Image (cartoon, helix red, strand yellow):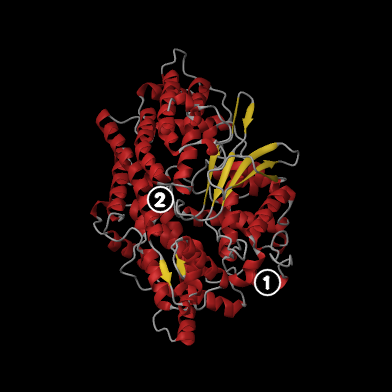
Amino acid sequence: MKDSENILLKNFDIAPFDAIQDTDYKPAIEQAILEARKEIDLIANSSEPPTFENTIAALDYAGYKLDRITSAFFNINSAETNETIQKTAQEVSPLLSEFSNDITLNETLFKRVKHVFDTKDSLELSREQQVLLEKKYKGFSRNGANLPEDKKARLREIDTQLSKLALTFGENILAETNKFELHITDEADLAGLPESTIESASQTAEEKEKEGWIFTLEYPSYIPFMKYAENRELRKKMAIAFGAKGFHNDELDNQDNVLTIVNLRHERANLLGYKTHAHFVLEERMAKAPENVERFLEDLLEKAKPAAELEFKQLENFAKERDGIEQLQKWDSAFYSEKLKQQLFELDDELLKPYFKLENVIDGVFNVAKKLYGLRFLEVFDIPKYHKDVKTYQVFDDKDNFEALFYADFHPRAGKRGGAWMTQFKGQFIKDGVNERPHVSNVCNFTKPTPSKPSLLTFNEVTTLFHEFGHGLHGMLANTTYPSLSGPSVFWDFVELPSQVLENWCYEPEALALFAKHYETGETIPMVLIDKIKKAANFQEGMQTLRQLSFGILDMSWHATDPSGIKNVKAHETAAFEGTKLYPDVAENCMSVAFSHIFQGGYSSGYYSYKWAEVLDADAFAYFKENGIFNKEVADKFKNHILSQGGTEDPMVLYKRFRGKEPNPEALLKRAGLIKS
């Protein structure tokens, strides 16, 4: 195909998914890299003296076509991949890594950037321009611009290896997830499972042309099985399969990948003058240093562990009294926790699900956004999609100005990785007087509709939808000049604030009344159920906090020390988990080899940020609660000082501008029930 015929190389506003062939991506990326190189060369070799506009701003706007193509491609690789796409990803990732290095290691370009940086005090720069200048300068200095040539060459090798390893890591986990199935042919083995779960499993079996019922490791299949299946041996089989992804000493094993990744990251940090990968990463985070993260995690652990141990003892006693279980195992956790919750609160997901039809929840989160920020969502049917399940919406403000395009992709499938995420097909920025509005996407894996029922969400899925939509709002309401400071382009331990704060509305009667309606009768969720949801909100909060802290501790154990002495992934992980351990270890399982957040995504040395942001979100929502959860003045402050500002200022400055003071950590501890109000 000639480049002129490649749809991705034509100027487009909306990603032309309906016209893209899988084979279009690689040549389009290769051509876009060539074009971006020319843009960079023009900036680096300009005969004009370096200024903020012709060097710093020009760099931020450069490579726009490449950004558009790669943002579409890498989401496809996560949401609708196949062998061709995966092969392309392995081929283009080194090219993109090389291109990135060619920019940061370009001495001529760095001299121009450094000149502007060194003369910044004489320039009349806005606050946003000052932040962009510092970010660009650090982008060079923190990524090898000052290194001698031999070390620059090694840095390039490391970055190329790391980009390929991250892809391989993720491909292995997806392949492992798709490979396993629990095929049940004896109806007795379905005891305890809800009708909707059984129907979904029957539908899966039918799709695979098999008799009976098939359960998979995809969350909408795996979680209800672990929560409700009475057959303990089958729960064990499922749990071990889930925990053994990437841990089979075969071609899909990730143990060597983990060890190679952490050692390369450590070597890279050392090359750049940092003690560890965590020291490198955290310099550009609110936490600033590994010691602060470790202190934060230890402080929370000290408060959460006694509560967790009491909750675990309660669960042990309950399982023993109910079924004579002498030793609780990990495959018992969800099952007995659900049964105990039902006993204590007369509440279970099956009771709630009829009130959470997916379409109603979507309308609900749109309504919450309307009441808070004046947004209106209009579903449109002529936007190109990469899969038929995707829904598309135009977003308008209260004056009917176009704000954003929103894509929603909510159901699992073979080509889609697990979990939930927000991405952008086009970021927001202002150039030549035009405010380019963003194209934002939420991708999740929720329960599919069955022949007899629509997609009915668990309460946990409802909070996940709100969480990802909170990230979406951060993108949709962005209003900054420069692309790299827009929307969710903020410090990593600040990025979870908009998402986590929105989850709070799921527990409020005033918000639930907007969307929690029975899918058959239309009846609004009764207050008695809302009260039970609120009472159950802190159920096993100590254990949940301990679990989250264990993940943050594991992350830091890989990245805040020299990993060269680690030879056994499982043994290292076991030692890291020692202080947070409640259940007996499962020899066949290893979390690190499937810990996609830190080995495939961007959370290395940053998993603590979920708890860090909880401190911010609990304090922020306390402000809403004091004034009314739909208080326009507070909502406007959150929009104007947090959501619209992106990374244009230090996060704590933005937060204090919204809140009037620094966050109070006690708000989180009170909400979690770990200290008394």
Q: Work out whether 530 lies above or below 568.
A: below
Instruction: Tell me the element at label 1.
Output: helix
Q: Position of residue 300 (x, y in %)?
A: 48, 63
Can you say which quadrant of the picture contains the N terminus?
top left
Q: Position of residue 106 (x, y in %)?
A: 36, 25
In the picture of the structure, the residue carrying the numbered disc 1 is 529
User: Mark 2–mark 1 contact, CB under 8 Å?
Assistant: no
The span from disc 2 to disc 1 (Cα, nearest Å) is 39 Å
Q: Position of residue 412 (x, y in %)?
A: 50, 56
Which of the two discs, 2 and 1, sits closer to the camera?
1
State the image quarter where residue 534 is shown.
bottom right
Going by the picture, which residue comes out furthest to the right?
399
State the residue at coordinates (50%, 39%): 72
- Point out which mark residue 301 bears: none
- Point out which mark residue 605 bears: 2
Q: Mark 1 Cα within 10 Å, few/some/many (few <14, many 20+)?
A: some
Q: Mark 2 Cα within 10 Å, few/some/many (few <14, many 20+)?
A: many
Q: Is residue 433 left or right of residue 149?
A: right
Is residue 214 shown to the viewer in this render? yes
Q: Amino acid at mark 1?
A: Leu
Can you say which quadrant of the picture contains the C terminus?
bottom right
- Observer-nearest of 642 and 400: 400
